[in-house]
Image (spheres, grey):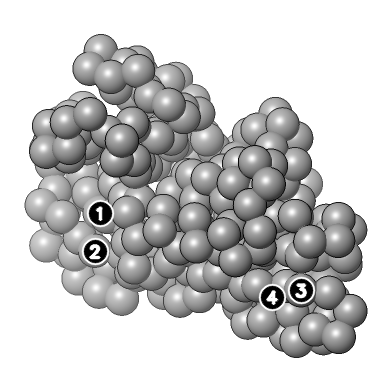
Amino acid sequence: MGVVTDSACSLPAELVEANEVTVVPMHINVGGGTYPDGALPLQEVAARLKDGLTTSGPGPGEVARAAEAADRGEGVAVLTIARQMSSTFTAASIAAATLARQRKVAVVDTGTAAGAQGLVVLAASRAALAGESLEGVVSTAQVVAGKVRLLATLPSLEQLARSGRAPGAAAWGAAWLGLNALFEFRGGKVRPLRPARSPEAARRRVLEAFFTDLERAPGCRAHVAALHAVDQAVAEELLAQVRTRVEPATEFVGSFSSVMVVHTGPGLSGLAWWLEEP
């Protein structure tokens, strides 16, 4: 069983390798050139945000080649960033239809992105490594996608509003001038939350949301990703705070990919999590 995803997933390279995940890069378009996600350092991307950077998902051919390489004969699950955020789901669906006569390919819209998407991918890949069928892997991905949450904070909504990925972001920014934006990304949509007066207060609110979920689900296993955009130390501290209350069954620090930073801007931090019932 093969598992394929796109580079929005924020999974560290060691987890990609250990869980036998195939990652198809998205693309950044700048200055007449197109670069695969990760080819440009995050710091350079952040410095060039006003240069008219745009992004694009992988094409159907790229996804098809990745699926062919990942297939060991039992089929392939392709898990994509939310379809509202990228053309990747459409490209994957076209690729699956193209390959239908040769191999079994199932496409799943995770409805999310970044570390939340990464947690869905890890659950699916571990099911695949445990010997689950394609149907079982897809079911696992869909269940986790329905449970996973992603809460994050940004110092500014300027880039999110400019990207068009969060309708209404410009209005939120005007209303929240001087405050730190908080949002939840779930079900393919960016949902604004009450802003905070400082980055520290915003991160406390993110942690409080996680701890509240934890208290409501005693005995559950926590799967957690701490996220950042060009500030790993902040994400590491968030994960350290998580560990004061629970030892996660899954944990990782994930950097937003260069493509994601084009849409959010630098300075993002947050948590993604899902709770597994015993």
Q: CA distance from mark 1 to mark 3?
A: 37 Å
Residue 2 visible somewhere in the drawing:
yes
Dot placed on the residue nearer the N-terminal end, 3 or 4 = 4
Density class for disc 1 (Cα within 10 Å; few <14, some 14-19, many ≥20) is some
105 sits left or right of 206 in the view: right
| Secondary structure type for disc 3 | loop
| Secondary structure type for disc 4 | helix
Mark 4 sits on what residue?
92
Question: Which label sits in the foreground, 1 or 3?
Answer: 3
| Secondary structure type for disc 1 | strand
Q: Residue at image x 57%, y 50%?
A: 124
Residue 191 — which label? 2
276 sits left or right of 36 in the view: left
Q: Is residue 142 above or below residue 22?
A: below
Whether the residues at callouts 1 and 2 have beta carbons within 8 Å, the answer is yes
Density class for disc 4 (Cα within 10 Å; few <14, some 14-19, many ≥20) is many
Q: Residue furthest top?
A: 244
Mark 3 sits on what residue?
104
Q: Is residue 7 above or below residue 138?
A: above
Q: CA distance from mark 4 to mark 2?
A: 26 Å
Q: CA distance from mark 1 to mark 2?
A: 5 Å
Q: CA distance from mark 3 to mark 4?
A: 13 Å
